Image (spheres, coloured by chain):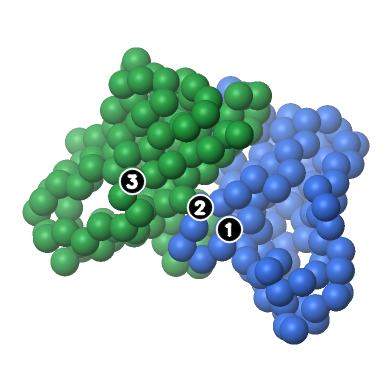
Amino acid sequence: GAVVSQHPSWVICKSGTSVKIECRSLDFQATTMFWYRQFPKQSLMLMATSNEGSKATYEQGVEKDKFLINHASLTLSTLTVTSAHPEDSSFYICSARGPLQETQYFGPGTRLLVL
Amino acid sequence: GQQLNQSPQSMFIQEGEDVSMNCTSSSIFNTWLWYKQDPGEGPVLLIALYKAGELTSNGRLTAQFGITRKDSFLNISASIPSDVGIYFCAGRVTGNQFYFGTGTSLTVIP
């Protein structure tokens, strides 16, 4: 149980285009999901906390107009990287707060490469 | 955001050896979580701890919630090559705020 999926697993796009990443909780309802960014050999950097039916809470330094988050249902949150640039290339990982509420379950990650 | 201090940063051990790593914080936490991340994958939850002093095992893995609530330990017994990866601790006070450690990279030499 407590499986989180992410789609796509990797994406290559041209600079200036927008990319949408989906995060789904497959066997539980997640009122709260989290979006992280991870650089090579580094820890997870929290970008934003996504609550179902309300606006996401962004961490300091994360541009909310650049990284659009929508949590329209209890099983789906999306992250859209708008007008992507090469510096946005990274590994993006979502997680969902688990059924016990005191745990987080991670998706498999999405590797984004912006050319 | 706050990060937890995790040590050691990296470990190179022989197959069959035991492994110990720890996570410390200046703040008190109510929940400690331990994750393993393989290259190119998302972290996988190994053990969750909810009470000070709690000792929990998952196969060859054992984790403890420190009595002071400011630290946690993860031990791996009789390491095998598939234990290779990066291990992260995470702490939670209340609500949605989870803080992650800097990670311990484990290499197991066959």
Q: Are marks 2 and 3 on the same chain?
A: no
Image position of B56 (left or right of B44): right
Q: Which mark is residue B42?
A: 2
Q: Quadrant of the C terminus of chain B?
A: bottom right
Label 3, residues with CA under 10 Å away: few <14, some 14-19, many ≥20? some
Kind of residue at badge 1: Gln
Q: Depth check: A82 or A100 in front?
A: A100
Label 3 SS: strand
Rendered residue at 83%/30% (across/down): B51
- Residue type at numbered disc 2: Gly
Residue A7: x percent and y percent? 33, 46
Query: Where residue B108 is drawn, which disc sits there?
Result: none
For disc 2, the chain is B
The secondary element bearing badge 2 is classed as loop
Give the labeled residue for mark 1.
B37
Residue at screen point 70% across, 66% down: B83
Q: Colour of chain A?
A: green
Q: Tell me the residue at 82%/61% (across/down).
A: B76
Q: Residue furthest bottom?
A: B110
Q: Are marks 3 and 1 in contact (CB under 8 Å)?
A: no
The hue used for chain B is blue
Report how far apart the C-alphas of labels 2 and 3 lie in the structure: 13 Å
Identified at 80% across, 78% down, the residue is: B15
- C-beta proximity under 8 Å, tags 2 and 1: yes
